[in-house]
Amino acid sequence: MNKVGIAAYGITPFTKDDKKIESILFESAKNLFANNPKIEKNEIDAVLVSTNNNSKYLAPILSESLGIQPKTAHSIENLCNSGTNSIVSAYSYIASGLADMVLVSGAERYDSPGQILDWDNSRGEFKHPIFWASIFTSSYKRKFSVTDEQLALVSVKNHSHAQNNPNALSKKTYSVQNVIDSKKITEDIRLLDCSRSCTGSASIILASENMIKKITDQPIWVSGVGQKTISAGFTKNESFYSMESTKHATKIALQMAGKKIEDVNVAEVHDAFSVCEPMALEAIGMSNPGEGTTLVKELYETKNLKINPRGGLIGCGHPLGATGIAQTIEITQQLQNNAEKRQIENANVGLVHNMSAAATSSTILVLEK
Amino acid sequence: MSFEEEISKGNFLIPECTVCKKLVWPPAEYCNDCMGKTTLKEGNFQGKIIEFSKQNEDYFCIVEMEDSFRIIAKITKEPRIDQMVKISKCGINEGNYFFEVS
Ligand SMILES: [Zn+2]
């Protein structure tokens, strides 16, 4: 397999703006080219668009609006982990030799149809994500005797991190009490426990070793890729207090990279709801089962930005198709020492965790300098 | 007769594989194990509450049916984990299935 690296990126602010999907997509790609003048647009072999938007033929549309004629152009949809699925596809095109340079652009509108999986009738009338999140939270609290206050700290921490990220939706910090006092969505979750749908876009260019040298002297390599799909339906999850697909995906990705979880200096994990962060930390092996909130507390109290430095989904907002790409951009910036106020010291190995529909499927990427 | 026709009339039937006898869920014409044809099985099915939460006055719970598959159902009285229940009401409302247990 050819080595594959990240050569360039571009991102937009995450907002509640009402814009056309085509315009949102274009914005982050435009930023990417503006920031990386060495890229020869005509050398892009493939354009992959990550979105849950129902518009058709978006990759050829984006290509045409960028004035390029790639060999391959198509969309990729896999609910909330569409973004990293697109990156894995780009990786595969390059690793196989089918392409040398691939543009991956993800975008979503605040009113994305990707929030509800209509097919999943086993959920009855409880199809909105707040219901699986409530079941996860209830199950996690029961299994490990964890409190609402301990979980609320995830939201406090990630909103706080987001204040150092100019592209984040959140412009405010909150206390544990603010989270507890925020609107009660169900018995088990509050409004501030939720990541919010929003409008935003993120683009990234992956390239082969030869191509990447022409574009950047700070390439970040994709050294590990792991994926697992358990089911489509939420109720087929093996447990409601752990992320089984994430465990499998992490094992595969770390093995491919030849790394242990202890080697990872910085990670973006998929905190769609507060409870997801400790569950993810446990699934990737950074915490023992039931001890994820202990790590969250320790990180918060020591102002350690290691987990979700950009603010995670809760702090940044969650434009579904853009999220996995935005997470990957954050880890890229961290490893390049370009993360400004969010910078973690000595970041050499990073990890991205992106999942869909209550962790019924997960992607893990390991990135290295 | 299809699962949807029956549930829209308030009847909860479970598809069973005519070849390997496995209960097939979500409802499908063919078995997801041996690909055999399924048929709808009637019965006084048992459910067990695995987990629950509450929104406003209503509880919603994960119910494991016949030790085989799970659904999310409404229950009006406060549930207990491992409580045995039966489907008391089901149907289709605005395109979505709904289940109630007691
Ligand atoms: Zn069968």
Image (spheres, rainbow, N blue to C red):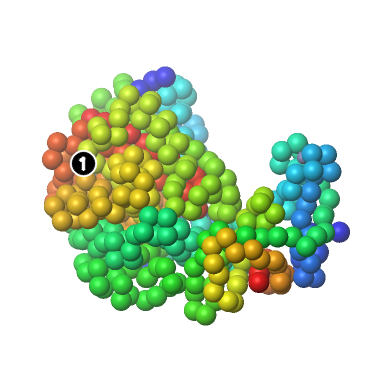
Q: Residues within 10 Å of mark 1 (few under 14, many from 20)?
A: many
The answer to whether residue A133 shows anywhere in this view is: no
Disc 1 marks a residue whose amino acid type is Gln
Q: Quadrant of ligand 1?
A: top right
Q: Position of residue A308 (x, y in %)?
A: 27, 50
Residue under the image location 82 percent in, 55 percent down? B41
Which residue position is annotated with label 1?
A: A334
Asked whether A93 or A59 is in front, the reply is A93
Query: Vertical placement of B45 versus A223: above or below?
Result: below
Looking at the rendered image, the quarter that the C terminus of chain A falls into is top left
Left-right relation of A156 to B47: left
| A44 to A105, vertically: above or below | above
- Asked whether the viewer can see residue A2, the reply is yes
Q: On the rendered image, what quadrant is the N terminus of chain A found in?
A: top left
Left or right of A26 in this view: A57: right
Residue at (59%, 77%) from the top-left corner? B76
Residue reaching furthest to the right: B1
Q: Secondary structure at mark 1?
A: helix
Q: Position of residue B48 (x, y in %)?
A: 62, 60
**Is B40 left or right of B52, judged from the image as shown?**
right
Subunit of label 1: A
Residue A75 image offset from top left, x and y in percent: 51, 44
Residue A255 location (% of width, % of height): 38, 26
Residue shown at 33% from the left, 64% from the top? A147
Q: Nearer the viewer, residue A276 or A13?
A: A276
